[in-house]
Amino acid sequence: MRISDTSDLWWKTAVVYCLDVEKFMDWNDDGTGDFTGLAHRMDYLHELGITCLWLMPFYPSPGKDDGYDIADFYGIDPRLGNHGDFVEMIRLAKDRGIRVIVDLVVNHTSDTHPWFVQARSSRDNPYRDYYVWRDHPPRKKQQPVFPDAEDSLWEFDEKTQQYYQHNFYRFQPDLNVTNPLVRDELAKIMGFWLQLGVSGFRVDAVPFLIDESDVQRPTGALEHPLDFLKSLRAFLGRRSGDAMMLGEANLPRPDQKDYFGGADGDGLTMQFDFITMQNVYLSLARQDPAPLVAALESRPPTAVESQWANFLRNHDELTLDKLTDDERAEVFAAFGPEERMQVYGRGIIRRLPPMLDGDPRRIRMAYSLMFSLPGTPVLFYGEEIGMGEDLAVGDRTAVRTPMQWTAGVNGGFSNAEKRRLASAVVTGGYSPEHVNASDQRHDPDSLLQFMRALIRRYRSSAEMGWGACEIVPQKSPTVLVHALVSDEGRMIAVHNFGTEPTVATFTVADAEPGDVLVDLLVDGRVVELDDGGSVTVPLDAYGYRWLRVIRPTGKRLG
């Protein structure tokens, strides 16, 4: 690895931070977050250390699906600001070394989008084939994405007497991406936002975006659905040499390899690793790293440009769909035992700290683990201060509550009356009185300060983003020891999933006389190896260590 590669392929060592502009900071006190508020919090994000800001949908929308029902792919929701505010935010972010990516939600539109309004006006309208229509739904009934809200993927349109497809809600008709005109429109959308300064896209629901199972393939269709992803990646390369696509593709491993573009790596640049995430929670529930180890070892080999995105929580439900029924039941029992904490029969609508009973040792171990996994870490706003959720919401939006800045009114998010807020502020033990950024900025022992330290160490440890993962044998059943190895060197992460103190004894591969381990997280202490390259590391309950191998002739800093 050349040092220039870490800049060229910037996503390999990025720290991604996802936020909803509507819920982040309200600067004009109308109850809704805005781009001006985000701009005024850019220094906070810079202090945190993040290098890539992912913005959830901010486009004009009826708001039936929290902004994912988009009525104008080129617009800015006027409640949040205008294009001038957006460009100013981009400028401030870049000035602080933060790139911005935006949600690309193009597998469907709102039913109020002008394309669909035209499409349903008559069967002969030029926009008709922008969507998927049938005289009768398929005989084989498919499961909707949101089974609690929809019982079919097809909705009857009275005016034109045909059914249109909607994998999500009935007010979100699916686009027909086999239509070359639609593909051209999507490329123009990407080109528009690239021109305004974004560095890439988080591509929503990728499997549904390229699904052609219910579409009659027209003239000009691509040979294979995955070719569409490759065409988008090629377009990015032509328009912006360093832009990337981060895909939401919750799929089995063989499919994930294909979505990356296989050995050529010409598909998605990054993918969220849902399988590893789900097995992290299974390992936490069992106090046994074995499920996580199996998930990591199941990752297919990828091209050097490709990267896994690691996360513990995102803006949706914590899906457990890739676990078996028995495994899912274990995780439900451990972290979401009440029915109100579960949704769709497959997920949990809680944030991490409440799931771990607020135990600071376990919370910090979980984030230490996430940052040390091979790949790029992704944070959801509020994770850095340990925010909780609002179970009263009752669905996946329970975690999309206003950011908690201070202990004051509305958590410092807005001075508007509570009834005017974009959503209610969390109450109870995780309310702003107990959890807020202002207090934690001045507390050296806070979670915020810990997260800053993790990010600093991650950013100075290129082997984490670039290195190959090796599971290091040792005998403690509650401990995971893994090494990350690259041309830069070797780093070893040690994590205790158990409730009791223990020790991990292991051998450092390829150790040479004089090699030592330097503790990167605690106090920089030096740990000596014995003559055979072995070492014993004591661990507290939920203990964790990051250890860098330093050689007498090496040039790496500890």
Image (spheres, rainbow, N blue to C red):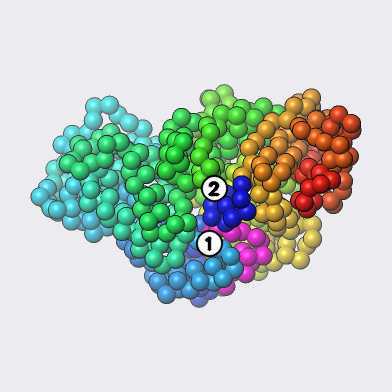
Few, some or many residues within 10 Å of mark 2 (<14, 14–19, 20+): some
Residues in magenta, as a range? 40-53
Residue positioned 22% across, 33% down in the render = 137
Question: Is residue 42 one of those drawn in magenta?
Answer: yes
For residue 476, the mark is none
Q: What percent of the width, then of the height, locates residue 186? A: 31, 54
The kind of secondary structure element at disc 1 is strand
Eyeballing the image, is 396 above or below 510? below
Work out whether residue 417 or residue 8 is closer to the camera in this orientation and state it.
8
Residue positioned 51% across, 50% down in the render = 315
Look at label 1 and name its amino acid: Arg
Q: Can you tell which of label 2 and label 1 is closer to the viewer?
A: 1
Q: Which residue is mark 2?
A: 314
Look at label 2 and name its amino acid: Asn
Which of pointers 2 and 1 lies earlier in the amino acid sequence? 1
How many marks the image carries: the answer is 2
Residue located farthest toward the front when viewing the structure as drawn: 553
Question: Is residue 144 one of those drawn in magenta?
Answer: no
Residue 397 appears in the figure: yes
Residue 29 appears in the figure: no
Few, some or many residues within 10 Å of mark 1 (<14, 14–19, 20+): many
Q: What percent of the width, then of the height, locates residue 528? A: 89, 39
Work out whether residue 210 or residue 303 is closer to the camera in this orientation and state it.
303
Work out whether residue 106 or residue 460 is closer to the camera in this orientation and state it.
460
Q: What percent of the width, then of the height, locates residue 254? A: 46, 29
Eyeballing the image, is 386 above or below 229? below
Q: Which residue is mark 1?
A: 99
- Labels 2 & 1 near each other (Cβ < 8 A): no
